[in-house]
Amino acid sequence: MPRSRPKPDRVAMISLHTSPLATPGVGDAGGLNVYVAELATALGRHGVEVEILTRRSDPATPEVVPLAERVTVRHLAAGPPEPVAKEQLPGLVDEFAASLRPLAAGYDLIHSHYWLSGLAALRVDQDHHHTSVRPPLVHTMHTMARVKNAALADDQQAEPEPRADGEALIVKSAEGLTANTGEEAAELRDHYGAAPDRITIVPPGVDLDVFHPCDQRESRDLLDIGAEAEVILFVGRIQPLKAPDVLIRAVAELIKQQPRRRERLKLIIIGSPSGPDRDWADTLPELADSLQVGELVEFRPHSERLELYRWYCASDIVAVPSHNESFGLVALEAQACTRPVVAADVGGLRHAVADGRTGILVGGHGPQDWASALGSLLDDPDRAVRLGQAGIDHARGFSWDASAEATLRAYRTAMG
């Protein structure tokens, strides 16, 4: 009988540009933060010691912060101990690698998240041409420059070529890669020439302890939302990629089609500006006013997860109009709360949402198409309830423990 490959005892999980301790929706914090924290916690339950390495961005934060059993967050020096714009972080990769280098021998494996982290892991060896000090590397892209540039929004800046080149180097050098879906694995192969035997499919999970079926009326009472309101909810960073402007235009189209709907329709947008396009967020209230729906659109800052759970519960529909998503955790969280999802027919959203069973996938980003999809559920609440009820069963198929088991397969392959 062949011997099974051993799993690592101690893993360094690198998230250079954003800490898992940050609140999703603030700055560059988003689904990646949730992914890293939840996956590390699940790996801890599987007996693996995980140290998450991130850049120190606050001098008052302790060097090491416990996150969960067998999981800690370690802050490494790289640049000033303060928030730095994401577009400036490539210049800090070498400093981060220098802080990582003396620690590297203490890990059985490194798992990097996002291209900046992957480059830092590779540069651990840059001063050791004859003797490698880097453990095996597994990398998770989360988003890819060449994929994003192939599906740019009108107002979105293209990802720079150095990022695409860096990603190509990571794909060439890493001992293992993980992808959320088979489609993402194909993108790794097609856009970067990734070797198929180095890719492991690792679907993300959803925290069913936080996000679960709930009482809409109770949540609306807590949030002071009227029982008769028709509530469309958007959750995410406010940037062109996430396309909240599509929903504002769709709401205007719904009012144009049915003026009486103005008395009850409400679009709630939860999130904060992010990325090099952060000034773009300022154009959204102006857009809503120009379309004469300003009073129907409410902009709210990021919410902690327990508060976010209440907003999901209070909504009638959760909308995810992104131009590209590697998966779409918001869609899973909404379905775990039995809310139907209307999402763009792109990327990982095709897997996160069961089209016609737990929600509706919309081809393109035209306001009329989105108005039609949203209106079809608002006008047929029985169908919306059926989709929402099916959502919880769909969401239960995505657990972080299953994600951890798949990740361990990737680790064993990379170590082998």
Image (cartoon, helix red, strand yellow):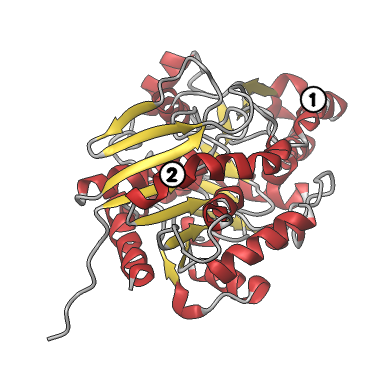
Residue tagged by mark 1?
A: 282
Residue 49 visible in the current orientation? yes
- Identified at 38% across, 33% down, the residue is 73
Pick the front one: 323 or 93? 93
Q: Quadrant of the N terminus?
A: bottom left
Looking at the rendering, which quadrant does residue 295 occupy? Answer: top right
Q: CA distance from mark 1 to mark 2?
A: 44 Å
Which amino acid does the dot numbered 1 rest on? Asp
Q: Position of residue 92 (x, y in %)?
A: 65, 39
Q: Is residue 23 above or below residue 13?
A: above
Q: Residue furthest left?
A: 1
Residue 102 has which mark? 2
Residue 132 has which mark? none
Residue 340 visible in the current orientation? no
Q: Are marks 1 and 2 in contact (CB under 8 Å)?
A: no
Pick the front one: 262 or 396? 396
Q: Residue furthest front?
A: 130
Pick the front one: 170 or 351? 170
Relative to 282, is 132 on the left or the right? left
Which amino acid does the dot numbered 2 rest on? Pro
Looking at the rendering, which quadrant does residue 209 occupy? Answer: top left
Which element is circle 1 on? Answer: helix
